[in-house]
Image (spheres, coloured by chain):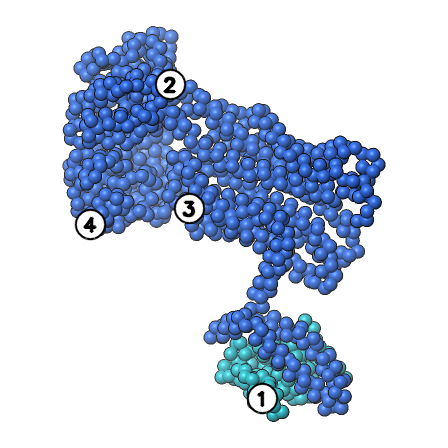
Amino acid sequence: MTLVRRLIRGLQALARPERADADLTDEISHYLDLTAEAHVARGLSAEAARRAARAELGNPLALREEVRASGWEHAWETMVLDIRFALRRLRTAPAFTATAVATVAIGIGASTAVFSALNPVLIEPLPFPHASRLVTLEDRNTRGAPMAATLGTYEELNARTRSFEALAAADVWRPGLSESGDPERLEGQRVTASYFEVFGAQPIAGRGFSAPDDRPGAPNLAIVSEGLAERRFGGTRSVVGRQIKLDGDPYTIIGVMPRGFANVLSPATEVWSTLRERATGDFGSREWGHHYELVGRLKPAASVEEASREVLALGRAPTPDFPRPPWANLETGLLVRPLQQTVAASARPALLAVGAAVLVLLGIACVNVVNLLLARGSQRGGEFALRVALGAGRRRLLRQVLTEGLVLAGTGGTLGLIVAQLGVHGLLAASPPGLPRRDAIRLDTPVFLFALVLAVLVGLVAGLVPALGVPRADVLQRSTRRMTVGRKGVRSTLVVAEISLALVLLVSAGLLFRSIHGLITVAPGFDPTNVVTLQVVESGHEFDSDQARLQFLDQVLEAVRGLPGVTSAAFTSQLPLSGEVDGYGFETATRPATAPGAAEDGSALRYAVTPGYFPAMGIPVLRGRALDASDRAGAPPTVVINEGLARELFGNRDPIGQRLRFGPEMGSDRPWREVVGVVGDVRHYSLAVAAPNAFYVASGQWGWVDNAQTLVVRATGPISTLVPSLKRTILSVNPNVPIPRVETMDGFIAATAGDRRFALLVIETFALAALLLAAVGLYGIVSGGVTERTREIGIRTALGATPGNVVGQVVGRALALTLAGAAVGVGGGLVASRLLASMLFGVSGLDPLTYGAVILLLVAVALLAAWEPARRAAGVSPSIALRAE
Amino acid sequence: MNAAMIGPMATPTTDVIQGTLDLLILKTLSLEPMHGFGIARRIEQVSRDVFKVNPGSLLTALQRLERDGMLDAAWRTTANSRRAKYYSLTRAGRKRLDAEAADWRRRSAAVSRLLGAEG
């Protein structure tokens, strides 16, 4: 009640200050009159009584202020007053204000935009209940690198581990949807029934999967995303219970997952079904392939380390209940790590590099603003001295200077939000394809709070530093000149700091640029010129038999080869640089898989290709022959291997005619494959990763015919015009096959540098902004120096200094500052290049070319910044020395 | 600003003890509604000029008590037809007076006992 009354009275006073003032004035004058009357009653004359009363009460205005100051609204009024004063002061110096506000806006805007990208990936917990208990489990290859696990491993872990509340496995699934509209290939996952339970996610309509749905032979059930339900089936409500056809099979939709479900393992997924598979003793089946992603929810009491230890111990202690093939023997252990870490792993280096870069930029912005304020502070020294002399309290002055800093930062911060909004758009447009949680990158509440905190911090820095310049009461006895000189030393240091920070960013950008240049000039092992690829998926029952699949491939190739401009065409089961990875272990006749230690022999990537693949990709055949039409189903099995594998297996011996078996063929009674040719190494994972071992078999000579195939077409000229006719040709052979991916090999090459390109683009932008800010800072100090020393320059000119001498002095000072900054910055650049190490390729962190070029650039900018002040200095007339200050 | 205003009169006066001004105002107003000067004068007279009321402190206290709902304020015309702001005690003010008076008696009795024991 009291509080409400206080609030209301305060607001009344705020709303009608003149009324509150008038009330008090009346009351005080009444008080004064009565006091005077009392004195008269004691015998004083009217005049004397009045004076006595005035002496007793003091200045009525001051009294009024005293009473008014006791209300809470007074603090508000003072603040408004301070802000208005600050705004007025800032308006009187538009050039200073514009520069400072723009600097703050750039600093805060860039930081906020970058924070919006970092926050959901690296900082914020994933949007699941108890997200810290979610972990992924990955198998390791012989070199210890993580890879997808097999279903057999999942089953063993599920039965034998105790640390997990629930474990789930997911497999990529790209079913064709041919219903109510164009045939479409959907992004999907086939999962164990526990999948959604692990994430703690609930459907918004219908139900989730239950254990019986995942038994072999269970009916076809599907859960769709809210997006798919609305896009294809007209809403989430009506879709439950509906029958749809996926890959030609009828599926019943039993549930809808909400948009808010962040399916971080496969964000594009729109449809889920159950795996309904069990790993058997037949190691040749697909359940023993490395293509299952494992995710688990730890029990509340279990830590990641404990789970890791348990899984490691389990891997070393196989039991007869769970037989393991050599390629999934868990001997190298399993990798258990937080889901968030797995999700962020690919984007982490780029994001951290960008984050560090923006910190540097923010630092430069702060330094610049402080520098501007100091420059202004030296002009305001006189003003402060005057106000202190007139009785202004030091505390009041401090509050005003601080308010000015905060107003500056507030205005800059508000503009910074616009910069941030643009920045977020730019980041999203430039972001590499693998950037996780893209949909969570936006200006939301935490991001706004971040910007607010940043603005306040910048405001405090911008307010407090000049506040140090607020004089004490004894200032009038001090020489103001000495103060400015001292301050100039600080400002020079700040400019040096700015230049060194700018150098750090420029060097980082330069090293990344050189890395990307190095990457795209790496020989990939194939010739990407005029090569386009189209992935087709043979979906539906018409492709149930291998025969039908092979026939489709043959028909498409025949039709495509007839198109004008096509020089060669072929199909392959996987494509270099596309992200597809399909590898198998191998054995040689002299060292079968059963030999001791043979399990560590490693693996090689398998390409099941049609004849013509090597010329279509431009992969050179080094020895023997390429695969041809004679290597068909039923013929003696053959294989072509890459140079690296040939050297590793056979050394100096002739590989042609040697015998090998791969993956499911190993240890079986299937015939050995004869090596008929050796081809050049091809970079498969990325241009930055050395070419892996590889083997090529004819499509018809593998245990199965892959249903996802990529058509590779080499043309005589530009290929963009060819794509529509290629699509038409494929659909004319079979109108039901989805074509989910069309990409040129040049496109894949560009994409492989995507992360670096992203980091480069952002850091390059920051580096340019930093360069600009540093130039402004340098200009400010050199120009200010010329202004302050106008008289001295005049005297020197009068004494015979040539314009050349004067210019030399001004430019010399700019160069000295720049070189000092560069010297400090080189140290910072070395640290930065170490942080960037994982993103550098083919260039040393000490690359003299980069450092040299950056220093030259800085020197050029310094000369540019010193140009105008130097000219002004040269034009100083000797007569100026005669004029009084 | 809160410095004592020493009056021009020769009699020795004391500033009202910090924290007791509220009590004195409430007590004074419990007799009849009064304006600011009247309150000050009454306090000085009843205390036989031991207490000197600082107008700034008084008006500030009046504003605070009014905002706290202890007092009501209204502009009235005085006997010699001048406008003056009259303060009167509210029910909450009366309650506060009783509580503070009891508290004060307890404290001053304790202080007196202590002084008596020492003497």
* Label drawn at residue A527: 2
Q: Residues within 10 Å of mark 3 (few under 14, many from 20)?
A: some
The residue at which mark 1 appears reads as B77
The residue at which mark 4 appears reads as A238
> SS for tag 2?
loop
Marks 4 and 3 sit apart, C-alpha to C-alpha, by 32 Å
Q: Residues within 10 Å of mark 4 (few under 14, many from 20)?
A: few
* Label drawn at residue A442: 3
- Residue A5: percent from left, percent from top: 49, 75
Q: Quadrant of residue A34?
A: bottom right
Q: Which chain contains the residue that carries disc 1?
A: B
- Residue A17: percent from left, percent from top: 57, 72
Write down the colour of chain A: blue
- Mark 4 vs mark 3: same chain? yes
Marks 2 and 3 sit apart, C-alpha to C-alpha, by 40 Å
Write down the colour of chain B: cyan
- Residue A503: percent from left, percent from top: 59, 34
Q: Quadrant of residue B43?
A: bottom right
